Image (cartoon, rainbow, N blue to C red):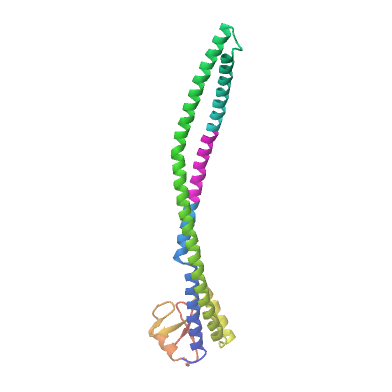
Amino acid sequence: MAEPYDTLLQVQELDTELDQLRHRIEAMPERAELADVRTRRAVLDASMVEVRGQVDALAARQAALEEQIAASAKRRHELEQRMRTGGVTAARDLQAMDQEVGHLAARQRTLEDQELELMEEEEPLDVALADKKSRAAALDADEARLVAAIAATEVELQASVGTVATLRAERAEGLPAELAERYERLRSHLGGVGAARLVGDRCDGCHLTLSSVEVERMRDLPADTFATCPQCDRILVH
């Protein structure tokens, strides 16, 4: 096989290597794992927002109850003070005040029971929220680990891409412009392979077998002349 076709196949091999390296960069298993981690984190964030909303609603109800309890306790204390200091002497007024104190005490107990129920209702939510925060922290650690691993691998692979690309450019300089243009055009729409070797009676590009007549015709061509695969149209070097 004569020049420039041996150089063309070298360029093809280097282009294939570059394609493989770039595919490795894009298809790192860590990328899929990272996407999964981020999806799970987003789902977890949504559930945390929901639980926090429930906790906040309970906290608001609890705050309202505490205000009512405080108001009842204050009113009760004021009445009891007036009753103890002798500021009210009329029996009917004292009786009315005593009844109100009783009602206030009962109301305060009811409100405190409701507050206790809210606290009991909030407890499992607090536990669930703490568990979700723990899981979120673990996912954040996984994300950081994967981002670092991807970055490190990218640096390594990009260095290889640079080395191979430099070598490829050096090899491609030896190709005639017309041949290089045809090769690039074929490569762009034939899955990255624009030139292949004829191995026996088989095209190494599409892996299909050529007829014996076609093979003989190609073998009769001058050594410095390339043929085109009748199956895939790739430059076929014999």
Furthest residue in direction right, as rendered: 87
Query: Which sits in the foreground, 74 or 200?
Result: 74
**x, y percentage for residue 24?**
47, 70
Q: Residue at x 44, y 47 (%)?
A: 131
Residue 160 spot, x, y in % from top left: 50, 77
User: Quadrant of the image for the C terminus?
Assistant: bottom left
Closer to the camera in the image, 195 or 29 = 29
Of residues 205 and 215, the one drawn nearer to the viewer in this rendering: 205
Residue at 56% x, 15% y is: 84
* Residue 63 in picture, x, y percent from top left: 55, 32
* Residue lying furthest front: 85
98 to 62, vertically: above or below: above
Relative to 219, say whether 114 is above or below: above
Q: Range of the magenta residues?
A: 42-60
Given the current orientation, which residue lies at the most extreme top position? 91
Image coordinates of residue 178 in percent, x first then y, are 58, 84
Camera sees residue 191 = no
Which SS type dominates the magenta stretch?
helix
